[in-house]
Amino acid sequence: MTPLALYIHWPFCLAKCPYCDFNSHVRSGIDIDLWTRSLLADLAHEAALTPGRRLSSIFFGGGTPSLMPPALVERLLAAAAQDWAFEPDIEITLEANPSSVEAARFAALASAGINRVSLGLQALDDQTLRFLGRLHDAAEGLAALDVAQRHFNRVTFDLIYARPGQTPDQWAAELARALAFGTGHLSLYQLTIEPGTRFATLVREGSLVPLDDDAAADLFALTRDMTAQAGLPAYEISNHARTGEQSRHNLTYWRYGDYAGIGPGAHGRRLGRATVRHRKPENWLNAVARDGHGIAEERVLTPGEQASEALLMGLRLNEGIDPDALAVRFALPRDTLIDAAKARFYADLGLIEQTPTRLIVTPQGMPLLDALLGELVPAALVSA
């Protein structure tokens, strides 16, 4: 049987933050015994549906999962190991905000079984952090990084670039500094203006001018060049790693492997089904008490839906996808997966590469990935 990944969502935050749309996250007096029982029950439900599988990765995400009591983390890992068994080199990642309060917990979390930490630094200077709406300052973030590197063998952090007015020299200096910290993995995201956000309002009002597409593409190319020269080449559109340091958990998503999701708001894909847990913590707790799990919606995905998702995820990777293997996997004709005429057209432009066994978006095509996906993956595939 193929390995399985597990995602555990912890919905509580250290304080109200601009990225958290659950006002109910910010509260005191959490009943840890109740949350422990409920998370264990949600986990047991998923384990009962996937007997005999081995876990290749576990990811603690959500609000501020590094605020989870280490004893709760340890209980969940022990239950997961008993219900599924672990791959010998299992990756167990925890997301953490770079605050001194959380950094002080790293030793206990490492003892509980966490072996990889993902820090949300986002920038290395105070001015940019204020612009991004972050609660920590640069000194606090770098102190957290130092503590993380002392307690965990595998550490990654993220930065956001292509900010308004950012020049190649500015980004090159910041990225060089980031690479000098010596982590084996970096997530480097271009700033995007999402509808309904504070940034979108500022753009509409004319007080924020996003970086234009050509300038952003130049920074993308610079990012790829610098990370490759430093020994952390891109393996996904926004992720860079030394050999062996790639995120195994995220690779499960991008390669369209099975993953179970537990906790409020968690999504899952397993056994050809999509699962969504109740988003509001109270509703999730009530569902677990009533049903033995927190699922709000579970539905069978059509072969076309699965193939479409696999394509949209897999083409993010530098390795691309194997159309023949996907056709066999989802029992669909190969020519329904990719628009062959458009694939030839974009191959001639150098935006994709087709080999006898792979279809790969080239480095020149990656900045245009969203548009390419819309062109290459037929809309009708979803109904197949």
Image (cartoon, rainbow, N blue to C red):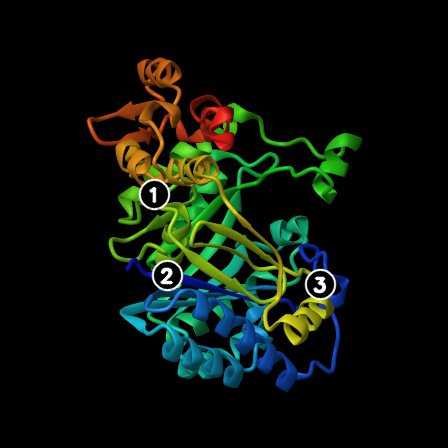
Per the image, the residue denoted by label 3 is 280
Q: CA distance from mark 2 to mark 1?
A: 24 Å
Residue 234 is marked as 1
Q: In percent of the image, x 60 and y 34: which residue is there?
A: 165
State the image coordinates of residue 71 (x, y, percent, origin top left): 51, 86
- Determine the secondary structure under disc 3: loop
| Residue 180 lies in quadrant | bottom left
Residue 120 vs residue 173: left or right?
right
State the image coordinates of residue 369 (x, y, percent, origin top left): 45, 30
State the image coordinates of residue 379 (x, y, percent, origin top left): 51, 25
State the image coordinates of residue 267 (x, y, percent, origin top left): 55, 56
Q: State which quarter of the image contains the N terminus.
A: bottom left
Residue type pointed to by label 3: Lys
Q: In percent of the image, x 59 and y 82: which residue is there?
A: 37
Whether 128 is drawn above or below 153: the answer is above
| Residue 114 lies in quadrant | bottom left
Q: Point out the residue furthest to the left here.
A: 356
Front of the two marks 3 and 1? 3
- Res 177 seen here: no
N-terminal of the two: label 2 or label 3?
A: 2
Q: Nearer the viewer, residue 97 or 374?
A: 374
- Res 125 seen here: yes
- Determine the secondary structure under disc 1: strand
Whether 286 is drawn above or below 250: the answer is below
Q: In percent of the image, x 29 and y 43: which residue is there?
A: 228
Per the image, the residue denoted by label 2 is 4
